[in-house]
Image: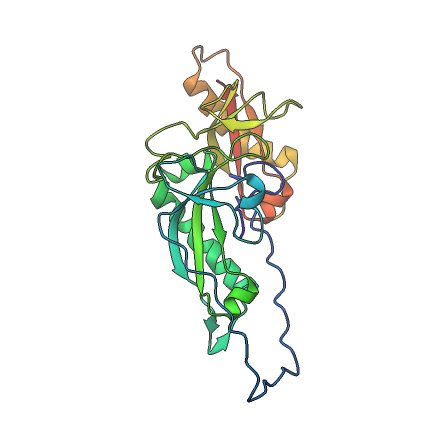
Amino acid sequence: MRLLSLGAVLVTVLLGGCSQDAPPAASPPSSSPAVPSATAAQPTASAAPRPAKDGCHRLTFAQAVAPAVSGTAVPCSAKHTSHTYKIGRLPLVSAGHLLAVDSASVQSSVAATCTSLLGAQVGGTPEDLRLSMVQAIWFTPSVTDAAAGADWFRCDVVALASAGGLAPLPRSSKGMVADSDRFAMCGTASPDAASFERVPCSVAHSWVAISTVPLAGKPYPAVSAASDQMESACRSAARSRADDPLDFTWSEERPSREQWDAGRRYGICWAPA
């Protein structure tokens, strides 16, 4: 499983997702596989069952970022922290060659599929999703289960809460970003403060993420370079929501290097709530 952009900071809008961690190297095949005896009884491996679409699960943060599927399947009417929105088949064959389930190619394909479908599931604009605590996570079978025939992948929605936690989800994740600001991104202080913690806007907060600004260039931008690109846009966004257009404040947050390397090429503008 990989969680988009969840490496350096709690939310990478970030992204596990939640940064997309590099998948583990594929296990090399044995050079001399054992030949079973014609008379000896051989154990039969049983693949992990295909997950149910639209299933709900009670996961901890640690379980959400763990390499193996865990947590508890629960009815969606019960308290849950993840909702499955896609079950698909792994692309295990390329140009006639069988790929390992944990290969970079397979894991990248699953990540791209799950993240590309997240917006259609939770609704809202791409900007709404960037300014939310909602993320995609994905699970694939273990190498052992894949060898036994498991060929599925699973995409889940989660919403990040305070550090190291997941927020309870509504009964269905369909339209959860478009229909409510419950999972919008807020902060307990200015993002440059030592006490800053990223939280959903449904809990106590003093700052709110108000817009994002694309950052140009391939090298990771220095603080001054990011500010040069963000200052005007952030100032305008903060002014547009201020009671007094001559007296307002804002803050600029550039992505961390880990987020930048994972593909997040935008900064976030913040303003007092």
Number of labelled discs? 0
Most extreme residue toward the bottom is 38
- Is residue 151 shown left or right of residue 12? left
Residue 268 visible to an observer of this rendering: yes
Q: Which of 105 and 215 is in front in this view?
A: 105
In this image, 54 relative to 151: left or right?
A: left
Quarter of the image holding residue 74?
top left
Please, which colouring scheme is shown? rainbow
Q: Where is residue 132 in the image (x, y as percent from the top left)?
A: 45, 33
Q: Which of 142 and 175 is in front in this view?
A: 142
Query: Looking at the picture, does residue 167 appear above or below residue 106?
Result: above
Question: From where the camera sits, is residue 16 visible?
Answer: no
Measuring from the top left, give residue 165's x and y in whole percent: 55, 34
| Residue 98 picture location, percent across and down | 50, 74
What residue is drawn where x is 37% and y is 41%? 75
Relative image position of residue 197 (x, y in whole percent): 59, 26
